[in-house]
Amino acid sequence: MHIPDGYLTPAVAGTTLLITLGTLLIASRKASLEKETLNEKIPLFTALSAGIFVAQMIAWPIPGGTSLHLVGGALAGILVGPWLGVLSMTLVLLIQCLIFHDGGLTAIGANILNMGIVGVLVGYTVFRVTQRIVKKVWLSSFLAGWLSITLAGLACGLELGASWNSTLPVYVMSSWHAVLGLVEGLITSGVVSYLTVKSPKTAWWS
């Protein structure tokens, strides 16, 4: 899902960068206002960022000229909240881009938007809403993981499609990531369910 340099038109790259910068500004301000819990979340924020970084470095190719890998956006949003989750994913994606050249510098706005903003906010929102309805942590976290990566893949496909003037990227990215979302959902569900039992202090939702 990491878009390389040269795949987006200047208009698409510029628009996604502006949206991303605006959202990061909001996320920074919102996170700074959570003074009561911010210090308590820093260790988890650090460990979570490192874990997601490693998970995202493992990718495998699929037909259509792209590849799949775990994202972790929903997990970040659930564990540390939507705003710190966005900042965690942004940190991971910046390091991958600047040091490991995973994703293009000109596409950094789009990559953060897709995985670090759409993935996190969708995952967190789905988790909170479904928790109120079904009240089953494993199901809520599974749906959060699945929908987060499915919609992040769709957003990526739309950006590529707009740049290439083609619907193929939309089909490839959305369909394959809907399948990968099942794996993402299972992993997210497993981690959240485990923490619910083993770390009640971390599991604010229990």
Image (cartoon, grey):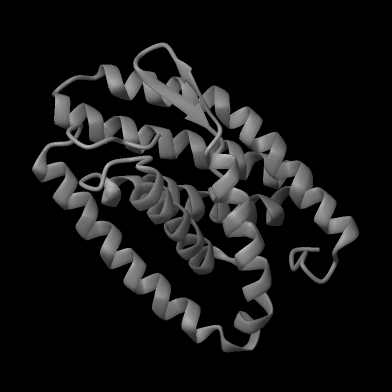
Q: Is residue 15 visible?
A: yes
Identify the residue shown where x is 74% and y is 64%. Answer: 205
Vertical side of 129 occupied by 40: above or below = below
Q: Residue at x 89, y 59 (%)?
A: 198
146 and 18: which one is in front? Answer: 18
Q: Residue furthest left?
A: 10
In the picture shown, does residue 28 fall above or below 159? Answer: below
| Residue 87 image offset from top left, x and y in percent | 46, 65
Residue at 29% across, 22% down? 169
Instruction: Name the spot of residue 43 as percent of width and height, x first.
Output: 67, 72
Q: Position of residue 81 (x, y in %)?
A: 58, 66
Q: Is residue 65 left or right of residue 32?
A: left
Q: Quadrant of the N terminus?
A: top left
Q: Is residue 85 left or right of residue 170?
A: right
Compared to residue 183, the image places residue 167 above or below, namely above
Q: Single out the residue that lies furthest toward the right.
A: 197
Q: Residue furthest bottom?
A: 36
**In which quarter of the view is residue 165 placed?**
top left
Q: Residue at x 27, y 16 (%)?
A: 168
Q: Position of residue 176 (x, y in %)?
A: 47, 21
Q: How many marks?
A: 0
Left-right relation of 54 to 172:
right
User: In which quadrant of the rendered image does the C terminus lie?
Assistant: bottom right
In this rendered view, identify the residue nearer to me: 178 or 164: 164
Can the viewer see residue 113? no
66 left or right of 13 in image? right
Name of the residue lying farthest toward the front? 99
